[in-house]
Image (tube, rainbow, N blue to C red):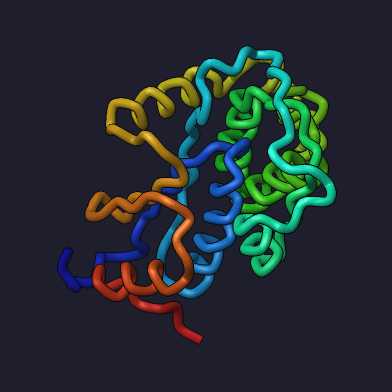
Amino acid sequence: MDAEPPAGPMQILMISDFVCPWCYLGLVEIERVEREYDVEVRHVPYLLDPTTPPEGKPRRPMTRPGDPPTAMELRAEAAGIRFTRGREWTSNSVLAHEGAEFAHEAGRAREYAREMFRAYFTELEDIGRPEVVLQVGERAGLDPAALREALEAHTYRQRVLEAIGWTREAGVSGVPTFVFGDRFAMSGAQDAAVFDAVMERLGVPRRAG
């Protein structure tokens, strides 16, 4: 990596899945990077478990109510995220990703992603259900009628599937993965110091003010 500053905002691809808890933590960090540095973030869909059927599938909770907080839960709490225990269902996230593409075109991708992660991990909603995606979209400031039409017509389905295919062909095997302007890739929900170090080594300036 070199320190030559990019021409204009650097694009960062965040490859993630809405059913991935580490992706939720990664979202918080990349939101901070976007606030503080001259970058633009583009969310790219990924399927953490491609074998999940369209209707979703049952899962066994990994923790019990009385168990001490896990390292992930403690980090989430420090980041202002609440992971609610007791999930008994894993959603298929393709429809949620379709909604994310709609949100991107509407300029509300960041708001949509935050609300979708919250719906899944805090509210324990089944984000594979159209009515849940619509509720999330409305909370994110999207036009509910236009979003419903796009979901029912699967307007963005092919785009989502092609993007998922691209991530597999690119060798992405874990998420979140961040691609910094085609110059550097990094996997995992790294902490703030790691992101700051990457920005410095890539020569990305902080935003003025």
Residue shown at 34% from the left, 27% from the top:
168
- The reply to whether residue 27 is in sight is yes
| Relative to 175, residue 110 above or below | below
Residue shown at 82% from the left, 43% from the top:
123
Drawn side of residue 177 relative to residue 25, left or right? left
Position in image of residue 70 (x %, y %): 66, 55
Question: Based on the displayed image, in which of its 4 quarters is residue 112 positioned?
Answer: top right
- The reply to whether residue 139 is in sight is no
**Along the line of sight, the residue nearer the viewer: 157 or 116:** 116
Position in image of residue 93 (x %, y %): 62, 27
Quadrant for the N terminus, please: bottom left
Residue shown at 63% from the left, 46% from the top:
113
Drawn side of residue 173 relative to residue 100, left or right? left
**Along the line of sight, the residue nearer the viewer: 105 or 42:** 42
| Relative to 72, residue 207 above or below | below
Drawn side of residue 123 relative to residue 41, left or right? right
* Residue sitting at the far bottom: 209
| Relative to 204, residue 108 above or below | above
Position in image of residue 18 (x %, y %): 61, 38
Residue shown at 38% from the left, 68% from the top:
194
